[in-house]
Amino acid sequence: MPQNYSSLTPLIIDKKPFKPVLKGWNRLEGRPRQKDFARSLRAEVRDALWMLSRQWQWGEFKGEDAGSPIDAIASVRQTMVNRYIVNDKAYSYKGELPLEVRVEAEFIPKDLTIQLQLSRYFLKLISAEVKFEDIKKAIIEKYPIDEDIKGYLDEDSQQFLNVAVNRCFDGVKLMEDASKPDFTIIDGLIGLTTTEKTTIKTAASKLESYFNSLYCQPGDRIQDAWKPGLLEYQFACSFENEKLQKTFLNADQYRGGHLDWFDFNIETRGEDEEIPDADGQVISPAKIKDEAFSFLPVPVEFNGMPSHRYWEMENYKTEFADIKANTTDTAKLLLTEFSLMYSNDWCVIPYEVDIGSVLELKGLMVTDTFGLQTYIRAAGRGVDDDWQKWGMFSLNTKNYFADNRIFMPPAIMKSLEGDEIEKVNFLRDEMANMVWAVESIVPTKMGIGANGYEAATKLGKPFISPLVNPEAVVKYILGKDVPINWTPFLPAHVEGSNRSIQLQRAQMPDVSEKLEAAVLQVPAPYYIHEEQVPRSGTIVSRSFQRARGTKGEIYLWIGRKVTNGRGEGSSGLIFDQITEQ
């Protein structure tokens, strides 16, 4: 039966928009079943699609119109250094001594230890003689131990003298007499036969060669490279080309220790600026070797460098991405950028360079996998003051144009340094308005270092306050005294200048005893440049050093080393003081 729609009740629909109510939320995150992610990061071969996606994401599918280098042809020139220059005089140099030894070596002091060492060697040479005791007694009487040598007489030195004065002799004096052409003093020994006297002369003549085989010393005092006014070494090396044009390698601020290529400045001078050769020096022409060679370039590798592929995870100790650098750390930022971005763009061409030579790269031709040849020029070529010039291993130059040669100095790789036999601390005393040279370690008569403050206390005179009226309330002190191991340096005007000053060595009044420090044994007047003693101070020390050469030979010498101080100091020196009685 049909229905009557007119009788139906109309449906009421609410047309207001629906507003959902947000009562809470949950973050979607993974829930790993294991704590080890090693397998997840391995990118195994079965995940081929994932690997292809990662290659696309890292841009490894992008083609590059460049090939890898497969061959390199280089033309180089090696020129050997043939001159050693000191005090504006040139000497022949063939690399027979490392530069550190040639520059730093000082004359060995003839202390008690050296006297004993030569004495024992001499007695060993004549020990097979029948009248050994008679010869020994005669030599001891003729060459007694020299007790008046320089140095502080400490307890060890005094005990040595008490024991050795009747058992040993002065081997240094015997060696010096034996080196003279008229060695006839032995002929006056009583109680010895002519054969025994000849044996003594033969054994004594071997002392000098034995001494020179142990220690390295300079040829003469003219070759001393130490500059007392600058507290540093200054020397140079040079060589000439086929046109006899000389090139100089100057080391003007060498402070002792280890020499390397960056300690030198390279300079080419004209004929009117050449340094003359020393008297009696016959200097051979410099050896020049031109060579062309071909090698396969090898990519640069170092610990911490990024890997070439994604699935090759770095496993090195160095983490360049964790370097903390500020905006002012330019060198650190450049190194980090090179290590993380451009390290795989560098290649190495192995080439052995002779020690003591200056290397000049004439040209470099690189062939890539496409057969293209590229001629590469030096990055730092051109005018020296060009702001775009850059070079990491180039030497400083005083010429207008850049110099791309590099020096391989004949230096020592590593040396052993003994205990300090002398140490002088140059420090500033703002209260006294002067600079002091404090001998904190002084050499003894045995040739070893002793505490300078103990020596000053033993040798110095105690400060005695002048007598005053006991009824006075106050007393006036003109000035106090300082220990004898404190040497004053006063400011003085530089000659010809009213503003620039330098430090001149002075002396405290009523100082009768002095400590024998070789650093301060400079003829008066002794001036030091003011900038050489900064606020932090400067320390100059002397010590024995021992090293081996490239052929296994041993070098033993005394050298100096300059290091930074530990700040200012106070001597306790006061003037014009009024104190209570």
Image (cartoon, grey):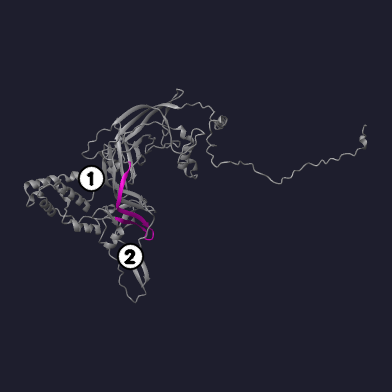
Residue carrying label 2: 480
Amino acid type at image mark 1 = Leu
Q: Earlier in the sequence, mark 1 or mark 2?
A: 1
Is any atom of residue 564 visible in this view? Answer: yes
Secondary structure that dominates the magenta span: strand
Bin the neighbour count of mark 1 within 10 Å (Cα to Cα): few under 14, some 14-19, many 20 and up.
few
Give above or below for 14 relative to 565.
above
Query: Residue 392 occupies which quadrant of the picture?
Result: top left
Residue 459, how many percent across, how many down?
A: 26, 62
Q: In the shown orientation, is residue 205 left or right of residue 527?
A: left
Question: Does the segment drawn in magenta span residue 415?
Answer: yes
Residue at the location (35% across, 29% down)? 76
Question: Does the segment drawn in magenta span residue 13?
Answer: no
Residue carrying label 1: 214
Query: Residue 446 occupies which quadrant of the picture?
Result: bottom left
Is any atom of residue 494 visible in this view? Answer: no
Query: In the image, which is nearer the foreground, mark 1 or mark 2?
Result: 1
Which residue of the protein is positioned furthest toward the bottom in this rendering?
Answer: 471
**Residue 302 or residue 259, whichever sits in front:** 302
Residue at the location (47% across, 41% down)? 319
Write the start and end of the magenta stretch as one range: 413-441
**Residue 99 or residue 520, whichever sits in front:** 99
